[in-house]
Image (cartoon, rainbow, N blue to C red):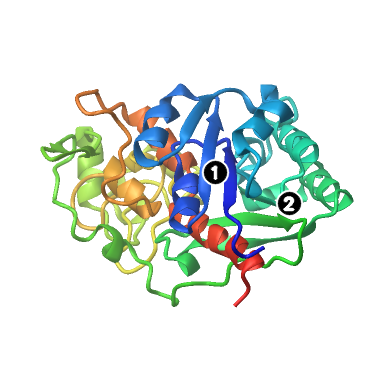
Amino acid sequence: MKHRKIKALDLFCGAGGLTYGLRQAGIEVVAGVDVDPACEYPYEANNNSRFLLQDVATLTVDQVNRLFGQTGLRLIAGCAPCQPFSSHRKGLDTSSDPKWPLLDHFSRIVRGVLPEFVTMENVTRIQRHEVFLRFVEELKTNGYKVVWRSLYCPNYGIPQERRRLVLLASRIGEISLPSPTHEKGSATVRRAIGRLPALQHGKSHPRDTLHITRELSPINLKRMQHSTPGGTWAQWPQELRSACHNKSSGKSFKSVYARMSWDQPSPTITTQFFNFGTGRFGHPDQDRAISLREGAVLQSFPRDYKFVEKGRPVHKQTIGRLIGNAVPPLLGEAIGKSIKAAINPG
């Protein structure tokens, strides 16, 4: 068993973060599937794998079996869109969100193919929902050993305060979640982006079009100049505060319009990380929000990961979405190594 190759199919593959990590762990990825056409270039440009522009809801068992072929152990991996389960949606009714059934389609494909391994990564809140519990019970019914837990990303070298639920399932024996690979305090903003070239707000680096920042308005530039690493807008002069800061409902949101700290992990990289006003996304000492490249590096993408074809314009909203929605590659690598360890313990 230990000499058999593992082949993976990456559902909801996005820009390829999970695929990249699995490949670093020595797992072949036969294809990635996603409904977003913006994912095609970064997925194929960085990974020796095929991209299928297709809704997972329309993917058939026959298609999947053809992709896997006749040899090797099979892994179906994926991160179903997490927006309905995100903490950012707290208090909102998301029951009509069309993304809700996508985990059931993941389950449908697993049930039809019965691969040797399954892995899923998602926000931690999903484990409270019936759709996740149904997914787990379906795996158990089909003979899988299943483990899952919330993992803290800095323990795996990812320099951001991100927690993600990781599920692993095996039909051929026991399987374990990845053990931490990095010491406490080793994954920091400084180690990740401290050596990237300095930039002014609204500018890009001539040798890296992704090292680009959003221009600040005059008042946001003043706010940035009055912000300190790890501080809050409460330190600003009164005239720089917005009306919402003076309301009781706004006083608890201290992590917006704020700078990161060099020697701590960054906050969770969201799809809006390039906006100073949407979180603690100010550079520790330069008067700007972090660049698209810095956000990607904080997600643990390599410095040379390609998101835009050479000569094409860089659309911050699109690239920010791809980066913020990605599975951190280092987490994907840790997952891949755990799966390999299940067939080659020790």
Position of residue 254 measured from the top left corner of the image (x, y, whole percent): 44, 53
Number of callouts in the render?
2
Mark 1: which amino acid? Answer: Ser
Instruction: Name the residue carrying label 1.
Output: 249
Q: Earlier in the sequence, mark 1 or mark 2?
A: 2
Position of residue 264 measured from the top left corner of the image (x, y, whole percent): 37, 67
Question: Which class describes the residues within 10 Å of circle 1: few (<14), some (14-19), or many (20+)?
Answer: few
Q: Is residue 118 left or right of residue 27?
A: right
Q: Quadrant of the N terminus?
A: bottom right
Question: Which class describes the residues within 10 Å of circle 2: few (<14), some (14-19), or many (20+)?
Answer: some
Q: Is residue 58 left or right of residue 35?
A: right
Decide which of 295, 272 is in the foreground and name it.
295
| Badge 1 vs badge 2, beta-carbon distance below 8 Å | no
State whether residue 140 appears in this view: yes
Secondary structure found at label 1: loop
Nearer the camera: disc 1 or disc 2: 2
Decide which of 216, 23 is in the foreground and name it.
23
Residue at 66% from the left image edge and 66% from the top image edge: 342
Position of residue 26 measured from the top left corner of the image (x, y, whole percent): 48, 57
Q: Which mark is residue 127?
A: 2
Secondary structure found at label 2: helix
Q: Which mark is residue 305?
A: none
Mark 2: which amino acid? Answer: Gln
Q: Is residue 299 left or right of residue 108?
A: left
State whether residue 212 appears in this view: no
Position of residue 75 measured from the top left corner of the image (x, y, whole percent): 64, 48
Residue at 63% from the left image edge and 56% from the top image edge: 166
Measure the C-alpha gap from mark 1 to mark 2: 29 Å
